[in-house]
Every structure is written in structure tokens, then in C-alpha cells.
Image (spheres, rainbow, N blue to C red):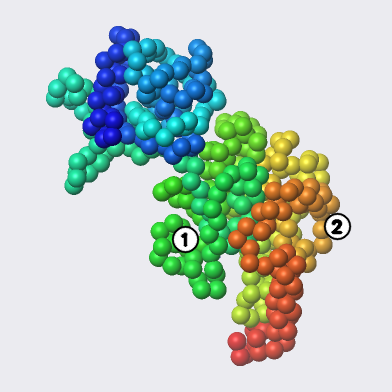
Amino acid sequence: MGSVRAAAEQVRGAMVGIDRAASRQVQSLAYEAVLFRPRHGTTCWACAGPAFRFRKGIIRSGGVALGLMNRRSVSTTATTSSSFSVPHTLTNTGHHTHPHSRPCFVLTRVAAPRPQPQQSQKRYLRLAPGPGQKSDRPKMAPPFNDLKYYTAATPNGLKPAILLEELGLKYETKSIDFRSNEQKEPWFIEINPNGRIPALKDGEMRVFESGAIMLYLTDMYDKGKQFTYELGTEDYYEMMSWLMFQMGGIGPMMGQANHFRAMAPVYSAYGIKRYIDETKRLFSVLEIRLSKADWLAGDKYTIADMANFSWVRGGPMFLDIDMTEYPGVDKWMKRISERPAVDKAKKVGAALSEDQLKEMITGMKAKMDAKKGTAEEEGSSKV
Ligand SMILES: N[C@@H](CCC(=O)N[C@@H](CS)C(=O)NCC(=O)O)C(=O)O
């Protein structure tokens, strides 16, 4: 079974063994065989491993199992032995670990209209394209269990880093060097067209924008819904609302406030006031919720808390916001800070320690303040 052709033969062999009902079901869809070589120990949807749990018990086969893949669930299975029964629905146990290094075969559903078979034995199969032929084969669906996180020690970088750590996922980190503008290099633009961190790759697939990365990670890797809620529930949309509140409010407004307070080329009293006032207004929105609840959405710590926390912690540090005015937010911040995963996440992609960072920010603010009343103050005739 070293080649795709051999794989196809194997698949066809399995198809021949299936009973009439199964056959009818299979014929109503178009499939193609994909040779799938999972790495040893990685997640595999299709092989006849020992942990394939079905509603009707556990199927074990010495041969190759063919999972008819439907993104997240395997709805039907055939084995190379003649024992084939439908419908078997894979329950939430979802993945299992690929127990061996043999290749497996997956039948993927072909979205395009079913091709008209020329010969009966090609009925259910289209082989992989030959050299120079274009593949119309659908890609394997995520997750790919091959995470690479592109980040730097900034609030947006911290958000998915907390989640990666909370989920205990294995991932590689690539720190992006802002001093050399690495985030604008063509190789990085391929990963994030916006030229900003964070970005994530899972195998060949990319995800950019911190909120999208958090949603991807919970969708794909938080099957137990530890840090999210079931899609379609009221709690899920409440969580999304607070996540979007961070993405569209807290993040951009605090980003501008930080810029005017410590990084702008001129001292702008107007810019500083405008964005610090807006930040305070947004903190009071958080206070409405957190004065009477421990978490932003529902009764558990979710990605909405992680996202907002990553920015809000910079309020006292960067903008000298007095947190005694927001006691609920302050307690919530301390509750999150105490989590070991949060502590680890702060170090992901960081070149400076927390104390060094605070020292650097103090220095930047002092430099900005020194511009007051000089030619570097906005409105000065020399600016
Ligand atoms: N909306 C984006 C914002 C990303 C962003 O602004 N990243 C900043 C760091 S926090 C960045 O990469 N700045 C470097 C630059 O602008 O070149 C997200 O949430 O991912």
C-alpha cells in the first residue's frame, strides 16, 4: 500500500464489501480517496485504532478503517474486512491517537457535483492528480495539531498566549522583532496581510487577528468548552459581545491612549485627554458588569475575560488610571493575574521582564512629559 493507487484499490476493496443499505448511502455522495499519513502519536480520524468509539460499541479491525469525514465527525465507517455497518456516529470522544505509523485512508466528501463515473470500478473514487494536473480535492480540515504562534510582548500578543497556555497546547513561538520591522517583511505579510502581530499557523493554515485566533483555538482545541460556551447558546453570544467590545473598543481606544501618552512624536494634550477619557468610559462599562459578577460572560472565565484583561492591565501601568474607581474590574484583574497560565503567557515572546517593561514605560512617559511647553508640544509654532 505504498502508493495512492494502491490506496484507492484498498478503498474500492472496502466498498465492495459493504452491504446494500450502506452502498446506497455511499452512492448518494461523491467521495475521493486521500492517502493520509498521520504522524505517529498525532490525531487521526480514520484509522482502525483501538479507541474508535461508536454509539454502538467499539469497532476494532486489523485492517484499515475508512472514515467518511464530515469535518468534525465521522458519520460512517467501513473497514477493509467485510464487516461494515451504518450508521455509526462517532460520539464526542472525537479524536483518537494514531497508534501506529501505517498510512490511513480517508474518504473525503467532494463538495462539487458528483462526477459521472466512466467505469463501474471508478464509481466512488477519483485518484490523486498526476504530475501537472490540478487538484480539485478539498483540503484536509483543521485542526492540524501543528501550531506556530507569531507574537511579541504586547497586549494583543498576550491574548492568544493566555489561551494557548490555559489549554496546555503544544506550540512553537516565533518572536517578531519590531525594531527591525520584521512584521512588515513579505514572508510575514503572507501570514498576516495586516503586518501586525499576533498571527497563528496550524500546519499550512493561517489565522490572523487576535480575536479570530482565540476563536479558532477554542473551536478546534477546546472541545470540553473550558474557556468558551456551546455555539448557539445565550452565554456564547454574551461572550462574543464582550470579546467584540474588546476588539472594537478597549483595544483600539487604549492603543491610541498609549500612543499619545508615551509614543507620539509630539506632546498632544488633546490626544491624551480624548483617548484616556474614552478608556475610562470603557472601564466604567466593564465595571457595570464586574461589580456584580466574577466574569464577563456567564459564570466562568472565558476568552472574553482573557482578551479584555490583556489590555485593561495596562490601564494603571501605562495610563495611570486609578483602579480604586473601578473596584469590580480591579478584583477581576487580580483574579486573572493569579492564574499560573497567565504568568507563563506574559513571558511568551517577551524580551523584557515585567519590571523592565514597567521601567521602560516610565521612561517613555517621562520623555513625553518633557516635551510639554517646548517646540515638541502640539500647537507650538515649530511643530
Ligand atoms: N486588531 C489587531 C491589532 C494588532 C496590532 O495592532 N498589533 C500591534 C501590537 S499590539 C502591532 O503588531 N504593531 C506593530 C505595527 O503596527 O507595525 C489584533 O487584534 O490582532
Numbered mark located on residue 194 in the image: 1
- Where residue 361 appears, as percent x and y from the top left, is 71, 72
Report the side of 340 relative to 164 (left or right): right
Question: Image quarter for residue 82?
Answer: top left
Report the side of 146 relative to 138 (left or right): right
Kindly identify the residue that appears in the image at 55 percent across and 25 percent down: 93
- Where residue 132 appears, as percent x and y from the top left, is 18, 47
- Where residue 140 appears, as percent x and y from the top left, is 38, 38
| Residue nearer the viewer, 155 or 91 | 91
Tell me the distance, in whole angstroms, between the alpha carbons under discs 1 and 2: 37 Å
| Residue nearer the viewer, 10 or 244 | 10
Query: Disc 1 or 2, which lies upstream in sequence?
Result: 1
Kindly tell me whether mark 1's CB lies below 8 Å from ligand 1: yes
Q: Is residue 243 visible?
A: no
- Where residue 13 appears, as percent x and y from the top left, is 27, 19
Numbered mark located on residue 52 in the image: none
Where is mark 2, residue-wise? 324
